[in-house]
C-alpha cells in the first residue's frame, strides 16, 4: 500500500491503543449516545468511543452497544420508528441535560452503495412473507435480484419497524428512509444545538483524533 494511503491507518491505531479523553466539564456530560442509520459507520465510531471514553460515559449494554442502546426516547442507535419525534418526546430529550448526542452520517452515494451490498432488515417484496413474521437480518438475497439503479427506486419495507409494531413501515425508496432518519437527527440537533456533534464517516475515518477533539 502506498505510504500516502496509510497515514490514516496509523492515526486510527493510535486512537484505539493509546488515546483516552475526558470532557472539560465532566459534570455537564455524564453519558454519550450515538445515533445513525444502518451502514452509516456507527460500529466504526462506537469502536473509537469504547476505547477512548471512560466507562462512566457509557449508556447501554456494556458488551455490544455501550453508546448505542438504551437511548432516551429512540431506544436504539438506528431509530427504528416510522414517525418524527413529537413535541413531548423532544421535551424528554431536552430534559436529558447531561447527555451528549453524536449524530453519525455518511456520504449519500457511499451509503446507498453500502445499503445495496448490506441491506440490513430489508423485507422481501410484499406478498412473499409477512414483514413482521420473522427476524430478517442481512437480506442480500433480495438485492441480488436487482441492479443498483433498480434498488435506488425500490420501496424499502423495514423489518425492524414492523417488528416494533408500527402500522406503517414502508418507504418509497432507500433515500426516503435516509431522509426520515436525518429528519429525526435534525430535530435533536435543533433542540440541543450545544449538546450534539455530527460525525461524517469519511472525515472521522481520515482523522479520528480531530473527531475526539470535537467531542470536548
Image: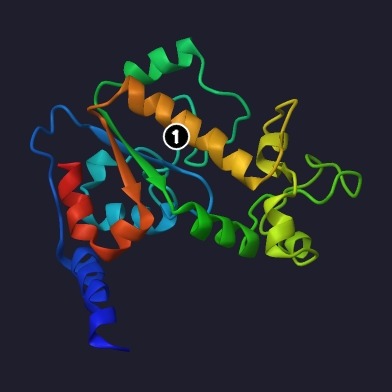
Task: Farthest residue to the right: give it.
Answer: 127
Along the viewing direction, whichever of 81 and 32 lies nearer the viewer:
81
Along the viewing direction, whichever of 194 and 32 lies nearer the viewer:
194
Task: Farthest residue to the bottom: give it.
Answer: 1
Seen at 49% across and 30% down, the residue is: 183
In this rendering, the answer to whether 171 lies above or below 138 is above
| Residue tagged 1 | 70
- Indicate the position of residue 172 as horizontal and vertical percent values: 71, 39
Image-based side of 7 in relation to 119, left or right: left
| Quarter placement of the N terminus | bottom left
Seen at 51% across and 45% down, the residue is: 37
- Indicate the position of residue 87 as horizontal and vertical percent values: 47, 11
Image-based side of 26 in relation to 74, left or right: left
Task: Farthest residue to the top: give it.
Answer: 88
Instruction: Examine the image and state in which quarter residue 23 appears.
Output: top left
- Indicate the position of residue 133 as horizontal and vertical percent values: 82, 42
- Indicate the position of residue 107 as horizontal and vertical percent values: 44, 54
Q: How many numbered marks, from 0 up? A: 1
Amino acid at each position: 500500500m502506498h505510504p500516502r494511503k496509510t497515514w490514516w491507518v496509523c492515526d486510527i491505531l493510535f486512537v484505539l491503543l493509546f488515546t483516552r479523553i475526558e470532557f472539560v466539564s465532566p459534570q455537564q456530560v455524564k453519558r454519550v449516545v450515538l445515533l445513525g442509520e444502518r451502514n452509516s459507520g456507527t460500529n466504526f465510531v462506537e469502536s473509537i468511543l469504547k476505547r477512548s471514553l471512560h466507562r462512566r460515559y457509557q449508556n447501554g449494554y456494556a458488551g455490544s452497544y455501550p453508546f448505542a442502546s438504551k437511548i432516551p426516547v429512540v431506544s436504539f442507535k438506528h431509530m427504528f420508528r416510522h414517525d418524527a419525534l413529537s413535541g413531548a418526546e423532544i421535551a424528554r430529550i431536552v430534559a436529558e441535560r447531561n447527555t451528549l448526542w453524536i449524530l453519525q452520517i455518511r456520504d449519500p452515494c457511499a451509503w446507498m452503495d453500502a445499503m445495496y451490498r448490506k441491506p440490513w432488515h430489508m423485507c422481501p417484496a410484499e406478498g412473499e412473507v409477512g414483514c413482521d413474521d420473522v427476524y430478517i437480518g442481512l437480506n442480500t438475497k433480495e438485492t441480488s435480484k436487482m441492479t443498483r439503479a433498480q434498488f435506488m427506486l425500490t420501496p424499502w419495507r423495514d423489518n425492524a419497524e414492523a417488528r416494533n409494531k408500527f402500522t406503517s413501515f414502508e418507504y418509497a425508496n432507500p433515500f426516503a428512509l435516509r431522509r426520515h432518519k436525518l429528519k429525526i437527527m435534525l430535530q435533536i440537533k435543533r433542540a440541543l444545538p450545544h449538546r450534539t456533534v455530527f460525525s461524517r464517516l469519511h472525515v472521522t475515518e481520515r482523522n479520528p483524533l480531530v473527531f475526539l477533539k470535537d467531542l470536548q
